[in-house]
Image (tube, rainbow, N blue to C red):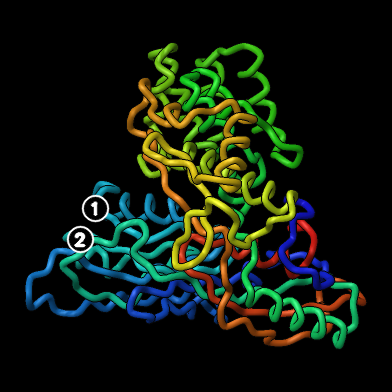
Amino acid sequence: MEDNFSTTCPGIGGQYKRRYSDFVVEEVIEDGSVCKVERFLKEESEKKELLEIPENKEEKEQLHLELEKINKDLNYAIRDLTRYLGISKKRIGYGGMKDKRGITCQRISLFQPDLEKLKKYSCPGIFIKNARWSDKKIDLGDLKGNQFEIVIRDIELEEEEIKKRVNECFKQMENGIANFFGEQRFGGARKITHLVGKEFLKENPEEAVMLYLTATFPAEQDDMKQARLALKKTMDFSKASKEFPSELRYERAIIHHLCKYPKDFVGAFKKLPRKLQFLFTHAYQSWIFNKIIERRIQEGYGLKEIEGDVLEDGIPTAVLPGFESKLADGKAGEIERKIMEEENMKLADFKIKSFPEVSSKGARKKLALFPKDMKLIETGEDEFFENKKYAKISFYLDKGSYATTVLREMMKSGQH
C-alpha cells in the first residue's frame, strides 16, 4: 500500500495518535444520531456519577447504553462489564469495533441486566450513559458510520501551506479514494492476523495457533518477546503457562488448553471469544481485497469501472473471497483470479473442515470510499514538538471504512 495513493495532492507528513484525545471516534447510528464523546474530554473525568435508567413501562428486554472509553479496547470493556454484572458475554451486543488508542463512544445493548448493580458500575477509562429500553439487540453492523476528529502532529510546514494542502486533498477526496482496510485489521503491531487466518484456511491449525502464540515484533516488551521465543523453540506449553505474562490473556487461555490437550489446536483456539475467532479469516479476506486494489492501481485502472466489474450503487467492487463467492468477469475478474493464484488459494479453501465455525461464504466490497463533512478545524504551534505544527481535521465515514485510509492520503506517509 506504500505508494498506491488515490490523490495527487502533496502530503502534510506528521504523525497521529500521539495523545488519546488526538483521536476521537463517535458512532453514528442508523437514524443519524451521534454517540457524543463528552466525559473524557473534560477535566475531572473520573468523577463518579450514577447511571440514570428510565422506567421500563413496556417491559422491553434490551437496555441500550452509550459506552464511552479512553485507551481501552472493546473486548476489555465488555469483559469488565460482564464480570461486574456476573453475566455471559452473549448478553451484550454492539455494532462495531472501535480503536483502542483514542477516545470513542458507541452503543451497546444489555439483555435484562441487574439495574441496581448496573447503576453503580464504575471502571477507570470506561463510562456508560444515556440508557434507553428497546426490543432489539444491537448486532454487528447495526450502525450508519463513524464521525472522526483527529489531530495530526509533528508537521514540518507553515500553517498556510498546511491549509492549502489539506483543502486540496479534501477536494480530491470528494471523488473517492481507495477503500483499503486499515492496518488494525491485520493485528496492529504484530501484523499477523491475516497470516493466522490463512493457515486455518489451508487446514494447518497447528501452524496457525503457533504463529499466533509465538510471533513477535521489535517494540514488544521483553518479557513477552522472550516467552514467545522460548515457546517457539521448546513447544513446552507447561513452561509457557508460567512464563507468558498475565497481559497476554488470550495466549494464556490457549496455552492452558494445550497443557491438557497438546494436539487439540482447534479446541485451543476456540478459547478465544467467538467474535474474535472470526477476525482471522476475515483479515485474510481483507488482505486479498487490498491486494486487488493495489494491482488495479499498479495496472493503471485505479478505482474507475473496467470490463467485468460488479457494481454496487454504481461503484466497482472487489471480492472478499469465500466458498460461495463468484469472481468478476472480464479484466476485473482476471485481476481477482491472478491475486488468488499468487496467494495459492481457491474459493473452496474458505470452507474449513477442521474449524467450520470460522468458514466464510464471502462478499463484495466497494473499491472506493467517499469521506463526507471533511473540515480543517484548526492549525497551530505543536506544543509537543518544538518548531512543528499541528492540524485538527474532522470527517465522517460510512461503516466498514477506516480513518487510517483517509489519513495516509492526507499525510502521504505510513507514519503512525
- Spot occupied by residue 92 in the image (x, y as percentages of width and height): 28, 55
- Residue 79 visible, this angle: yes
- Spot occupied by residue 16 in the image (x, y as percentages of width and height): 72, 66
The residue furthest right is 387
In the rendered structure, which amino acid carries the disc numbered 1? Arg
Identify residue for label 1.
Answer: 91
Residue 119 placement, left or right of 2 = left
Residue 171 placement, left or right of 344 = right
Alpha-carbon neighbours of circle 2 within 10 Å: few (<14), some, or many (≥20)?
A: some
Element carrying mark 2: loop
- Residue 12 visible, this angle: no
- From this view, report whether residue 183 is shown above or below residue 110: above
Depth check, front residue: 299 or 69:
299
Structural distance between the alpha carbons of marks 1 and 2: 9 Å
Looking at the image, which residue is at 37% across and 26% down? 355
Identify residue for label 2.
Answer: 113
Point out the tag, 1 or 2, that comes first from the N-terminus: 1
Looking at the image, which residue is at 37% across and 38% down? 324
